[in-house]
Structures are given as structure tokens and as C-alpha cells.
């Protein structure tokens, strides 16, 4: 493996690919660079002297400014770099995008639903309207395992603490999230369970849900029945029978909707795993498919790149609102806009939020941005979409599922076992992580630093994702507990 990596010709830093002791002399573009600090893997080294206040360039863009003079060969990190984030900004639309070359779409084996949508799993879900009935839905889930037959991929309940004592948009967020779950095509059938006295009434939920197939979706209000668990089991038997009629059939990958997410990053994430997912996204979009990029705070500092890739001025304005409204959300609670990255990200070599963001947005590849979605809004436009959601791994991944993602591609340099309601594929940024946590990691992007080309690895990864979608293989997280429903909370609880 090489000792270092320079991401962009404009960069004023290089990234260490392995521990580099002080005193090491590197050959960088036919010039000698003497390293004057011990450099951990994933961390940055100054290519030349940098004056106080001058920008630090990585990915070809500033990731902050020098907090004080930095010498050539010095370690660059949180001790000598400061962010430039912190204000609402005005933006100018300067279109900078290209059309991807269309490719004949591949096929996968999916479940074609009666409404024309396609699912990649055939599960039966139990969705509570309020946290008060969490114990009830868990009991119904357990008793309903008797109806699990080979035609079904699983029977799951999704618990959460919300649905009552919420106000205004916070209340609406919960309703939109629950409706998104009920509509999701990975569920062949759904039982919606309420208590009966919560402010998220069943009538409201039906109104938010809109038209639905009464054979596919059933409703249970616990206070209306003497034995709500027995009634729930009865309804589940009907729903499992309904869902069992669906079988895998050939579908186009143009029907796939894939969510893009990163978490627990390191200095390799923006070099390997995120660009690999970006290459996948471009391949999917080229074949008529759909990808969704979220984590709005991890667009801060890199937002103009996405704005200028907007397909038109209207989409650009929606992207501006996405960024500035999320900054206002921070401000409402008195939080700094640059409140990131996490301790794990910093330990892995991520210095500022701009550093994280410029690596994060690479998951969106190079495709133009076709639409911007509010939280809980269903995706309708094929191509690359942006989605309003925070950086939190559980909330953001679930937001992708709620908006219609069949699967979430989750890149990580630190590792995580969690699963959201849809298959959650973990892509490691480095080989060491994939070997250490082989029970968590599905695909190793670290091989990009070991001589393999992006084209070769991206093609292999695309085929792997198609296999997961087809049920040929499972995401490793699917064997773990995925029964929580983390909903984006923003407001007062009574």
C-alpha cells in the first residue's frame, strides 16, 4: 500500500494511508517532503507552509482555515484548523452538471405490488400509531410468527415513543413517518395499531395515508376490543395470507430506490467508500434508477456543489431552502452550525464539518440533482434526490426508508451493527475494519487502496447490491434487531 494519497491536484494536504513517523521523507510529485510530526492513518499532512488564515484545501475545496501558521510536513487537524461555517448565506445558481450516459438497465428479482410499485422484501409489518401500544405490537409480532411461511421474508413490528402529546410540525413528522412505513413496498401487508385516546388518531392516520388497499392494510384500535392481542393475531393471519400471494419476478433496476448514508467516518471514507457509493449511484441513475442523499448538516460547506448540480432554478431554490432551513433549525435551539464531526470522526482524521461534508457528498456521484424532498415526503422523481434529515445514523437511515428507499448503502470507517427498517448494507472504508468486524461489514471499499480500479470494484459492488435486492444474499444487519423506528423529533412534548 502507498504511504499517502493526494485526492485533488489543487489540494494543499495529503492523507496518510498508514502511520507515518516524524522524520520520514516522502516523495510527493517528484519533490521531497519531510514529515515533522507523527501522522496517524487517515490524517492530513501539510504539503507546504500555510499562513494563519489561509485556506486548507482538500478535495479541491477549503475545509477550513489555518488557526495559526502551519509548517510544511506538519500534522493538520483540529489543533491548528478552524471552520469557516456559522452563518446563513446567499447563493447564486451557476449550473454545473452533465447528463449521464444512459445504459440499458439490468434486472433483479423483486416483488411487484398491486399498485405497480416494486419491493425487494416480502415482509409483514406491524406499525403502532403511538408508543403506548409498543408492548402490544411486540406481543402480536411474537404470536404471529406461527404464520411465517417460506413465501414471507419476515414479520416485524416497529416501535417508537411518539404519537401523542406532540404539537404542530412535530406531530406531522410522526404522521408522515408512519404513513411512509405503511406505504413501503417492502411490506406485502401492514397492521396499523393504535390505542384509542392518543392525539394521533386512527382517523388522522387514514387521512394522511390517503388511498390504500383494504386487503393489504388493516387497522386495530386496542381500546375497542376486550382482547386486543387476540384480535391482532386474527388480523395478522389474514394479512400474512394476503402477502403470501406475492412471488419474486424479473424487474428492472430502474425500479430500485437506494438510500445513501455514511456514519462513523475516517480519513479514508472520502477516498474509498463514499466515492464507491457515488460510482454506484451514477450507475443506477444511468439505468433509470433512483438514489436519495441525506444528512443535511453534512452538506454544510459543500452545499454549492450540490446546488450547482440542480437540474433547474426551481430545484436550486429548493436546495437553498434545504440548507438554510436546517441552519435555522440549529439556531432555534441555540446550537452552533458547525456542531460536527463526532469524536469518532475526529479520531479517524476528519477535522472540520467542511472536511466531513466534502467527503460525504461524494456518495451522490456526479449526477444532476432532480428533486429535493421534505422529511417524510415520498420520492417521485427518478435520478438523484436530496432529502431533509439530520446526520444521526438511525434517524437519517430511517428517513431514507420512509421516503421509499428499498435499501440503504451505509459507508463507515468505524463500524456499526445497526439496521433500519430496510436492508442496511455496510461498506467499510478500510480493509482492517472489514476484517475486524466481518459480522457487520458487507463490502470492503478498502481494496481501492490496494491496486484495484474504481471501475472494477464499482461493477462488482453493483452486482452485489443487485443480489441483495434479489434476495440472493442478505445484508448482515438483517440478522440483527431492526424493530425500532427512530423518527425525527423537532418540537415540544406536552
Image (tube, helix red, strand yellow):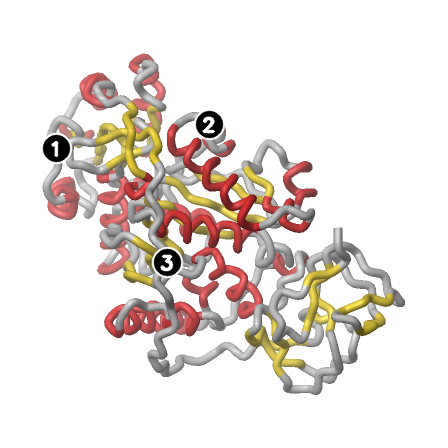
| 156 or 352: nearer the viewer | 352
What SS does tag 1 mark? loop
How many C-alpha atoms fall within 10 Å of the one at disc 2: few (<14), some, or many (≥20)?
Answer: few
* 388 over 410 or under it: above or below: below
Left or right of 210? Residue 11 is right
Residue topped by disc 1 = 213
Give the residue at x 62% y 58%: 343
- Which is closer to the viewer, label 1 or label 2? 2
* 119 over 82 or under it: above or below: above
Residue topped by disc 3 = 100
The residues bearing labels 1 and 2 have C-alpha atoms spaced at a distance of 30 Å
What SS does tag 3 mark? loop
- Which is closer to the viewer, label 1 or label 3? 3
Q: Earlier in the sequence, mark 2 or mark 3?
A: 3
CB atoms of marks 1 and 2 within 8 Å: no
Residue topped by disc 2 = 473
| 185 or 177: nearer the viewer | 185
The residues bearing labels 1 and 3 have C-alpha atoms spaced at a distance of 37 Å
Give the residue at x 48% y 50%: 277
| 6 or 473: nearer the viewer | 6
Q: How far across and how far down the image is residue 163, in percent?
A: 26, 46
The residues bearing labels 2 and 3 have C-alpha atoms spaced at a distance of 29 Å
Q: How far across and how far down the image is residue 77, in percent?
A: 69, 69
Q: Earlier in the sequence, mark 1 or mark 2?
A: 1
* 241 over 446 or under it: above or below: above
What SS does tag 2 mark? loop
Amino acid at each position: 500500500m502507498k504511504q499517502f494519497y493526494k485526492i485533488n491536484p489543487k489540494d494543499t494536504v495529503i492523507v496518510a494511508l498508514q502511520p507515518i513517523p516524524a522524520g520520514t521523507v516522502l516523495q510527493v510529485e517528484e519533490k521531497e517532503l519531510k514529515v515533522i510530526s507523527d501522522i496517524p492513518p487517515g490524517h492530513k499532512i501539510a504539503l507546504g507552509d500555510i499562513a494563519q488564515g489561509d485556506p486548507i484545501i482538500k478535495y479541491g475545496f477549503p475545509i477550513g482555515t489555518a488557526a495559526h501558521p502551519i509548517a510544511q510536513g506538519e500534522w493538520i487537524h483540529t489543533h491548528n484548523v478552524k471552520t469557516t461555517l456559522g452563518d446563513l448565506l446567499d447563493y447564486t445558481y451557476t449550473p454545473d452538471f452533465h447528463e449521464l450516459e444512459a445504459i440499458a438497465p439490468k434486472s433483479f428479482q423483486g416483488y411487484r405490488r398491486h399498485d405497480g410499485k416494486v419491493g425487494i422484501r416480502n415482509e409483514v409489518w406491524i406499525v403502532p400509531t403511538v408508543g403506548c401500544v409498543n408492548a402490544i405490537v411486540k406481543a402480536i409480532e411474537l404470536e404471529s410468527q406461527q404464520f411465517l411461511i417460506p413465501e414471507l421474508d419476515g414479520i416485524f413490528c416497529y416501535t417508537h415513543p411518539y404519537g401523542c402529546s406532540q404539537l404542530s410540525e412535530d406531530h406531522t413528522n410522526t404522521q408522515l413517518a408512519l404513513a411512509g412505513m405503511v406505504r413501503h413496498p417492502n411490506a406485502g401487508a401492514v397492521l396499523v395499531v393504535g390505542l384509542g385516546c392518543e392525539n394521533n388518531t386512527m382517523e388522522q392516520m387514514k387521512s394522511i395515508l390517503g388511498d390504500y388497499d383494504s386487503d393489504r392494510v388493516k387497522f386495530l384500535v386496542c381500546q375497542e376490543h376486550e382482547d386486543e392481542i387476540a384480535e391482532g393475531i386474527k388480523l395478522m393471519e389474514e394479512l400474512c395470507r394476503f402477502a403470501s400471494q406475492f412471488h419474486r419476478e424479473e424487474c428492472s433496476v430502474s425500479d430500485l430506490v437506494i438510500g445513501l448514508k455514511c456514519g462513523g467516518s475516517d480519513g479514508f471514507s472520502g477516498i474509498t467508500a463514499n466515492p464507491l457509493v457515488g460510482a454506484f449511484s451514477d450507475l443506477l441513475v444511468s439505468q433509470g434508477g433512483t438514489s436519495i442523499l441525506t444528512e443535511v448538516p453534512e452538506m454544510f460547506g459543500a452545499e454549492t456543489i450540490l446546488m450547482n448540480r440542480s437540474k433547474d432554478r426551481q430545484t436550486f431554490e429548493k436546495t437553498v431552502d434545504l440548507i438554510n432551513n436546517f441552519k435555522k433549525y440549529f439556531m432555534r435551539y441555540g446550537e452552533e452550525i458547525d456542531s460536527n464531526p463526532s469524536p469518532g470522526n475526529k479520531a479517524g482524521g476528519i477535522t472540520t464539518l467542511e472536511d466531513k461534508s466534502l467527503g460525504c457528498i461524494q456518495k451522490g456521484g456526479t449526477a444532476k440533482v432532480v428533486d429535493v424532498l421534505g422529511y417524510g415526503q415520498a420520492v417521485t422523481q427518478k435520478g438523484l434526490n436530496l432529502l431533509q434529515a439530520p446526520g444521526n445514523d438511525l434517524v437519517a437511515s430511517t428517513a431514507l426508508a420512509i421516503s421509499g428507499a428499498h435499501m440503504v448503502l451505509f459507508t463507515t470507517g468505524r463500524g456499526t451493527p445497526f439496521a433500519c427498517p430496510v436492508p442496511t448494507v455496510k461498506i467499510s472504508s478500510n480493509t482492517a475494519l472489514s476484517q475486524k468486524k466481518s459480522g457487520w461489514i458487507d463490502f470492503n471499499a478498502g481494496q481501492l487502496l490496494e491496486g484495484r480500479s474504481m471501475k472494477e470494484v464499482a461493477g462488482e459492488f453493483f452486482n452485489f447490491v443487485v443480489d441483495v435486492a434479489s434476495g440472493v444474499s442478505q445484508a448482515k444487519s438483517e440478522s440483527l434487531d431492526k424493530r425500532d423506528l427512530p423518527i425525527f423529533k423537532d418540537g415540544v412534548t406536552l
